[in-house]
Amino acid sequence: MPQPKTPATVYGKRLRSARLAKGWTQADLAKRIGMVDTVSGATRVSRYETGAHDPDPATAEALAKALGLPLAYFHATSDVLAEIILVVSRLPVAKQKEALERLKELAARGAER
């Protein structure tokens, strides 16, 4: 059995990781975002994961929603920023605002050094 191609992009790596964390196949994910033909849908998901194609904005949003993750997580430029996005997104809005204020304070103190 051939090995799946390694994701070539950060987006693809995070998409595959999130899908596998749910225990879903590429066809499962395709079906969950409304791709009726799961065979061609699985091919499209594979292409997104390997970086051969980028999903259009609506599809990217649907993928993120199906996986229960914020879209920004998939596009964060570093793993640390991606983790911050995940942590903050799991907080209620009031706590998100509090976290933002604390991060601003931390950034201001860091700029002073």
Image (spheres, rainbow, N blue to C red):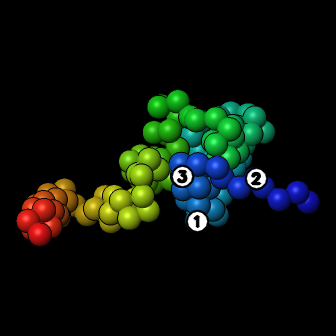
Mark 2 or mark 3: name the one nearer the start of the chain. Answer: 2
Query: Secondary structure under badge 3?
Result: helix
Q: Where does label 2 land, which residue?
A: 5
Give the residue at x 32% y 63%: 84
Q: Amino acid at mark 3?
A: Val
Is residue 32 depicted above or below 92 in this figure?
above
In three-dimensional space, the C-alpha distance between marks 1 and 2, rounded to whole angstroms, equals 18 Å
Give the residue at x 47% y 31%: 57
Query: Secondary structure under badge 1?
Result: helix
Using a 10 Å C-alpha cutoff, classify the residue at mark 2 as few (fewer than 14 neighbours), some (14 to 19) or many (20 or more): few
Is residue 32 depicted above or below 55 in this figure?
below
Q: Measured from the top left, where is residue 10 in percent x and y?
A: 54, 52
Query: Secondary structure under badge 2?
Result: loop
Q: Quadrant of residue 43?
A: top right
Mark seen at residue 84? none
User: Can residue 39 be seen by looking at this rendering?
Assistant: yes
Mark 3 or mark 1: name the one nearer the start of the chain. Answer: 3
Mark 1 or mark 2: name the one nearer the start of the chain. Answer: 2
Horizontal side of 65 relative to 94 (left or right) equals right
Mark seen at residue 21? 1
Give the residue at x 88% y 57%: 2
Q: Quadrant of the C terminus?
A: bottom left
Q: Amino acid at mark 2?
A: Lys
Tell which residue pokes out farthest to the right in this image: 1
- The answer to the question of whether label 3 and label 1 lie on touching residues, with beta carbons closer than 8 A, is no
Q: Measured from the top left, where is residue 45 in percent x and y?
A: 66, 43
Q: Which-is-in-front pick, marks 3 and 1?
A: 3
Q: Quadrant of residue 20?
A: bottom right
Using a 10 Å C-alpha cutoff, classify the residue at mark 1 as few (fewer than 14 neighbours), some (14 to 19) or many (20 or more): few
Q: Where does label 3 land, which residue?
A: 10
Q: Amino acid at mark 1?
A: Ala
